[in-house]
Amino acid sequence: MAPVPVYANLVLAGLPIAEFGTESQQAELLGAMSAGQAKFSAAIAEIAMNSAIATQVTATRDGDGWRLDGSKAMVPDGAVADFILVPAVTGDSTSVFIVPTATSGVTVTAAEVGISGDRAAHLALDAVAVAGEALLGSEGQGEEILTWIEERANIGHCAMQLGVTEEAMKRTAEYVSERKQFGISLGSFQALAMRMADSYIDVEGIRSTYWLALWRLSNGQDARAEVRAAKWWACDAAHRVVCTAQHLHGGMGADIEYPIHRFYLLAKQISFMLGNAGQQLEQLGKLLAADDSLGFRALEV
């Protein structure tokens, strides 16, 4: 639950730099990251947004470098980032640039605190000049890189959601075991025990789908359907787990000086990052409709 930029730093930026970066980019940037000398993020929060409200950055050639103009919204931990990965339109394609936030023309504005206490930022680029070495991967490879990042980001959400729901469930089990009503512990009531059993099933559902998707990604296998299914579990099942935790804590669950509400808030936030449960199902349905083999693979699982 600690509000630290681990996800933005390692998942959104560290992994793609390790995968697509040049040797010099990896040595300089990943070295600074591992030494704690620089923090990173990526401006990809708009992937699941409606195109009508999404913002855009354009990149035009400027000698041996590039000029970036435009804006991006809700960059995770963007206000503390020293470098931000920024997708930009380059002609008829998309490319990704590693932009130092200290560069002239870059404005990072801290957004309001999110529902779980997180801090995102809005990014504005006004005639920002970056060197050719700022390009991640090759020109026009942006869509491939963004798809790659999105899959790992969603798996990162599943990992965080597993930790949030499992800890919320454990704390709730301890609470109902100690809290007494009518002289006996709440945990001895059959209705409460059944709700805790349902929470256990949901947590294990998040765990198993997450590990399957992660295993396929780690082994270089097609994991598009598995990632969507895992994120759906991480959204849908988490809602039931944290609602049960709040409910079984009774009045204590409504007391903001008691920590259980923080699990509810973070679980809800994760559920809406890069697409909620309904959006994940929609994308999964499109995958299954387009490729029968994905459906057969799901049946085998």
Image (cartoon, rainbow, N blue to C red):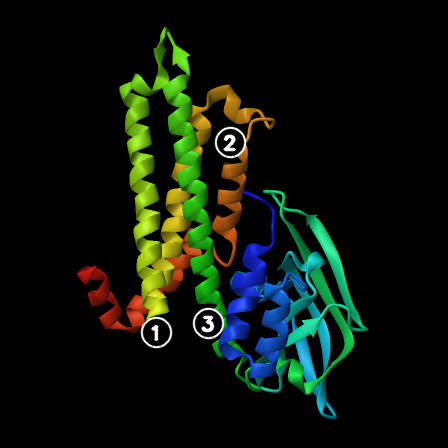
Q: Secondary structure at mark 3?
A: helix
Q: What x and y, as percent, mark residue 163?
A: 43, 45
The residue where tag 3 is placed is: 148
Q: Characterize the local packing of mark 2: few (<14), some (14-19) or many (20 or more) Cα atoms within 10 angstroms.
A: many
Name the quarter where the N terminus is drawn.
top right
Outermost residue to the bottom: 63
Of marks 2 and 1, which one's residue comes earlier in the chain?
Answer: 1
Indicate the amino acid at tag 3: Trp
Residue that numbered label 2 is attached to: 260
Q: Is residue 22 visible?
A: no
User: What is the secondary structure assignment of the residue under circle 2?
Assistant: helix
Residue that lies at the very extreme toward the right in this rendered image: 104
How far apart are labels 2 and 1 at the CA level?
Answer: 38 Å
Q: CA distance from mark 3 to mark 2?
A: 34 Å
Q: Which mark is residue 220?
A: 1
Residue displayed at 62% across by 87% down: 91
Determine crowd level at label 1: few under 14, some 14-19, many 20+ residues with C-alpha closer than 10 A: few
